[in-house]
Image (spheres, grey):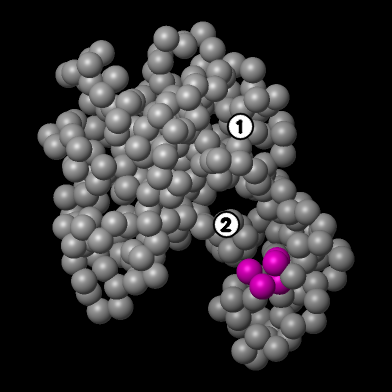
Amino acid sequence: MIGSLDTTPLTSGNFQFICDLVRRDAAIVIEKGKEYLVETRLAPVAMREGLASVNALVDVIRAVGNGNPGLTSSVIDALTTNETLFFRDLNPFDALRDHLIPKFRAANPATPLSIWSAASSSGQEAYSIAMLLNESFPGQPARILGTDISNHIVKRAVAGRYDQLEVNRGLPAKLLVKYFRQETGGWLLDERIRRQVDFRTMNLAGNWPLLPRFHVVFLRNVMIYFDLETRRRILRKVRDTLIPGGYLVLGSAETTVMVDPGYVPVSVGKATFYQAAAQKT
C-alpha cells in the first residue's frame, strides 16, 4: 500500500495507454518494463484526485478523454524527469566562462548575450548561468531564457526557492552565502538573479513560439527520452535559433553524431559543444 492507495499493478492495457498518451503529448518514450516507475510516479496524482488506485486514475483519463486537460497535464508532469542541480557537470560552465563569453564579447561587445536553458526543470541550470555572469562578467547585458514542459515546475523555477538538499547539490558555499537568503524550510534566491531569467512553459516536441536568436543553447539530458525522429526535429529547430557561430550544449551521454549532420562537434576547454556546420568559424 502507498498510504491508503490500492497498489494493484497497472493492467497491461492501462500501461500501454499511458505510454501512448505521454508519447503523443510530450514525445517521451516509456519502454516496456517501466511499469513500476509509472505506478510510483502516478500514485501521488491518484491520491490527490481521491481515487482508489493508479488503474482508477487511468480509467478516469480514458473516460474523459480531452475533457480534463488539467488531469492529463498532471500525469505528464509526474512522468517528466526533473532531475537537475546547480552547475551540473561543471565543464560546460567553465567553457562558457573561459572561452565562449569572452569570444562573443570580443566579436560584438555591445550585443547582449542570449542564452537558452531548454528543459530547465526547477531553474538550477538557468540560475547557474546567471550567477556565473554576475561573478565573472558584472554588468554584462544578457538575456537568459529557461523553458520546461511542466507548468508546475516552471512556477517553482520562477519562485527561486530551494530546500537544503537542492542547494547542497553543486552550489558552491560562497555563492549560497552571496545570492541566497535562508528562510523557514529552505533558501530564497536573490531577486536580482531571479529577474535575469525569463521562464516559460514550452513543449520541445510541440509547436514552438517565436524565439530570439541565441549565442548558446543548453539542451542537456533530455534528448535521451525522445525517439530518433523527434531528436532530429528538435535539433533542426535549435539550429534555426542559433546565431552564426552559436553553440549547442548537450548532456555528456548525448551527441548530434549520426543524428543531425548539420552540427560539428567542437572541443571548448574540457567540454564538447556543437556548432551548425555552415556556421563554423
Name the residue: 47% across, 55% down.
84
Q: Is residue 197 magenta?
A: no
Q: Residue furthest front?
A: 270
Q: Which residue is mark 1?
A: 255
* Residue 238 vertical placement versus 79 (above, below): above
Marking on residue 144: none
Residue nearest the observer in this picture, 243 or 11: 243
Mark 1: amino acid: Thr
Horizontal and vertical percent position of residue 106 = 22, 16
Horizontal and vertical percent position of residue 185 = 30, 78
Q: Which residues are magenta?
A: 37-41
The quadrant in which the C terminus is found is top left
The mark that comes first in sequence, 1 or 2, is: 2
Magenta span dominant secondary structure:
helix
Mark 1 neighbour class, 10 Å CA radius: few under 14, some 14 to 19, many 20 or more: some
* Residue 25 vertical placement versus 218 (above, below): below
Asked where in the image residue 169 lies, by quadrant, the reply is bottom left
* Residue 51 vertical placement versus 60 (above, below): below
Mark 2: amino acid: Thr
Q: Inspect this view and state whether residue 63 appears.
A: no
Q: Residue furthest left?
A: 139
Residue nearest the observer in this picture, 195 or 248: 248
Name the residue: 40% across, 29% down.
269
Q: Count of labels shown? A: 2
Q: Is residue 10 found left or right of 241 in the rendered image?
A: right
Asked where in the image residue 117 lies, by quadrant, the reply is top left
